[in-house]
Image: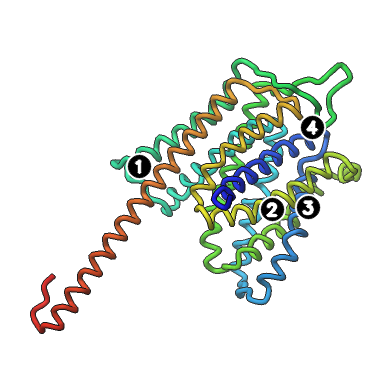
Amino acid sequence: MGEKKPYLAVLLVQSIYGGMFMLSKAAFNGGMNNYVFVFYRQAAATLFLAPFAFYFEWKNRPPLSFVTFSKIFFLALFGISFCLDIFGIGIIYATATLAAAISNCLPVITFFLALLLRMEVLKFKTVSGIAKIAGIVACIAGAATLAFYKGPHFNLLCIQHLSGSHNSQGIISHIPSSQTRIKGCFLLFLSNILWGLWLVLQVRVLKNYPSKLLFITLQCFLSTIQLFAIAVAAERDPREWELGWNVRLLAVAYCGIVVTGVTFYLQAWVIEKKGPVFLAMSTPFTLVFTMILSSILLCETITLGSVSGGLMLVGGLYSVLWAKRKEEKMNDENSLKDEADRECLELKQVVQAETNGPLLV
């Protein structure tokens, strides 16, 4: 059973993300303001993470300079606040299935941004380099297919519209228009670019502030303040800020506590046991969970374009991950070879020292 735990954990992580896409869309379908929702989500995440951060890392916290604080502030602004607000607007225009599908290109986007910032290397004449290029092309093609192609529609069994926004005549499947679909896909893709940039840039900041839990909690706190300012400027109707015992409260609590809290721990545990590539390879399961749940609970219609584009994104993801895995394996083999050569040289030195003879290399 112990060997199966990482597999069960990644399935749980991806199902949680699938629930995030579905509940966010349900809250917006129910009329909740995007800016208010994102503020409440980050506030809940901050309240959840703060006690753990203070308990585990406050006593041994590293010094926080003004320069490092400024970097964390702008990381929170662009990588969390702007990213989540743009994501929320995008999912309003699109569907939960499209949001889950486009999320598959995040590892490819992250690699491409790291390549531009010279944190990654692309060797065009190697098999792994060609696989990376193919993955980037497949990602772009998949995003274009999601945005511009619908194709035939497929309807699964719809048992209950979670947002309660259907009319008395019956449940109407949500099919965005072409213009709305393109706008939604563009915004979702832009949010993934901001998220990928956040992932790349925070590596450098963590070198100066290595307390990971405090680092994440501080970003959540700063983004809460930023999002509050944005929400107040965008929505001044007090009724839009009300949370009742409905899907709005459920979505806020789920995204703020379960997504930020539970998945934070589970992902760290999976990476420790199986590595980051294993976790990244499970990303397509989010699309499967979201597609099924949103069709049943949100009555969203699945299109051939969504399925085709999603498959292209998944193909691009696995192509880049395979190339990364191949390069890591080659680097490990080269390291072992260098270590063996060094040990052999040391052994020769010991033998020559004992015989007082000339060193043979």
Of marks 3 and 2, the one in the foreground: 2
Task: Say which residue label 2 marks.
Answer: 262
Q: Is residue 211 left or right of residue 29?
A: left
- Name the residue rendered at 61%, 72% in the picture: 65
Most distant residue in the front direction: 1
Task: Say which residue label 3 marks.
Answer: 228
Sooner in the amino-acid sequence: mark 2 or mark 1? 1
Task: Say which residue label 4 marks.
Answer: 29
Of marks 2 and 1, the one in the foreground: 2
Separation (CA) of disc 3 from disc 2:
24 Å
Q: Secondary structure at mark 4?
A: helix
Task: Say which residue label 1 marks.
Answer: 129
Residue type beneath disc 4? Asn
Relative image position of residue 120 (x, y in whole percent): 41, 51
Relative image position of residue 185 (x, y in whole percent): 61, 32
Crowd tier of the residue under label 4, counting other residues whose Cα lies within 10 Å: few below 14, some 14–19, many 20 or above: some
Crowd tier of the residue under label 2, counting other residues whose Cα lies within 10 Å: few below 14, some 14–19, many 20 or above: some
Sooner in the amino-acid sequence: mark 4 or mark 1? 4
Relative image position of residue 255 (x, y in whole percent): 73, 47
Verify CB contact (< 8 Å) between mark 3 and mark 2. no
Question: Taking 141 as reference, is 281 above or below it?
Answer: below
Residue type beneath disc 1? Gly
Residue type beneath disc 2? Val
Q: Secondary structure at mark 1?
A: helix
Sooner in the amino-acid sequence: mark 4 or mark 2? 4
Separation (CA) of disc 1 from disc 3:
44 Å
Of marks 3 and 4, the one in the foreground: 4
Separation (CA) of disc 4 from disc 1:
43 Å
Separation (CA) of disc 4 from disc 2:
26 Å
